[in-house]
């Protein structure tokens, strides 16, 4: 088994309207899809962990300072589509299966039930020092 991290950014795919502006029924359908998706992964034993993150306004960036206390700033201030919204850690038989799961996640419905086609970044978790040199 191999672990993969599926990264979900705030990039709405083919949906330009922020989710907080959707109709309540569309928001509920979106969340129900995600809950059902995660339940299927739990049942199959492939889900390790999944978390949604708070809005970027709550984020802090910390940089170590060699002489003084660490520097803490508000942020990040990247483009919203580059900001991490949540993630799923999965443990699957193959990269193909990880891509399959990511493709399903990308079909999460948006307004009117139309799949968002949101991009999902798939990253394999390093499992040996050899992975450091696999570029």
Image (cartoon, rainbow, N blue to C red):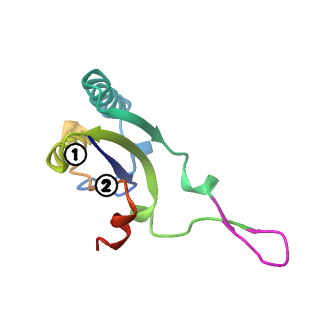
Q: Which one is in front, 99 or 111?
A: 99
Q: How crowded is mark 2: few (under 14 residues within 10 Å), some or many (20 or more)?
A: some
Instruction: Please tell me which residue is depicted at 28% across the width and 25% down the height of the picture.
Output: 36
**Residue picked out by circle 1:** 98
**Which residue is rendered at x = 46% and y = 60% of the image?**
83
Instruction: Compare residues 49 and 73 and report the one nearer the observer.
Output: 49
Quarter of the rendering containing residue 114: top left
> In the image as oriented, which residue stretches furthest toward the bottom?
67
Residue interval drawn in magenta: 60-71
Mark 1–mark 2 Cα distance, whole angstroms, equals 9 Å
Q: Is mark 2 on a helix, strand or loop?
A: strand
Left or right: where 10 falls relative to 109? right
- The percent position of residue 27, horizontal first and vertical second, equals 36, 34
Q: Where is residue 70 in the image (x, y as percent from the top left)?
A: 77, 68
Contact? badges 1 and 2 (CB < 8 Å):
yes
Q: Which residue is drawn at 38% across and 31% down?
A: 24
The residue depicted at 32 percent of the width and 40 percent of the height is 90
Above or below for 101 versus 74: above
Residue 74 is inside the magenta segment? no
* Residue 128 numbered mark, or none: none
**Percent x, y for residue 64?**
72, 71
Residue picked out by circle 2: 124
26 versus 11 height, above or below = above
């Amino acid at each position: 088994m191999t672990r993969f991290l599926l990264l979900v950014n705030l990039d709405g795919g083919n949906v330009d309207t922020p989710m907080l502006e959707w109709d309540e029924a569309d928001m509920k359908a979106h969340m129900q899809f995600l809950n059902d998706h995660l339940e299927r992964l739990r049942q199959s034993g492939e889900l390790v962990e999944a978390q949604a993150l708070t809005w970027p306004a709550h984020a802090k960036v910390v940089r170590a300072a060699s002489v003084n206390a660490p520097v803490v700033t508000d942020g990040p201030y990247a483009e919203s589509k580059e900001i991490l919204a949540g993630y799923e850690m999965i443990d699957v038989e193959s990269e193909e299966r990880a891509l399959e799961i990511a493709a399903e996640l990308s079909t999460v419905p948006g307004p009117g039930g139309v799949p968002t086609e949101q991009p999902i970044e798939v990253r394999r978790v390093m499992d040996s020092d050899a992975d450091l040199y696999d570029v």
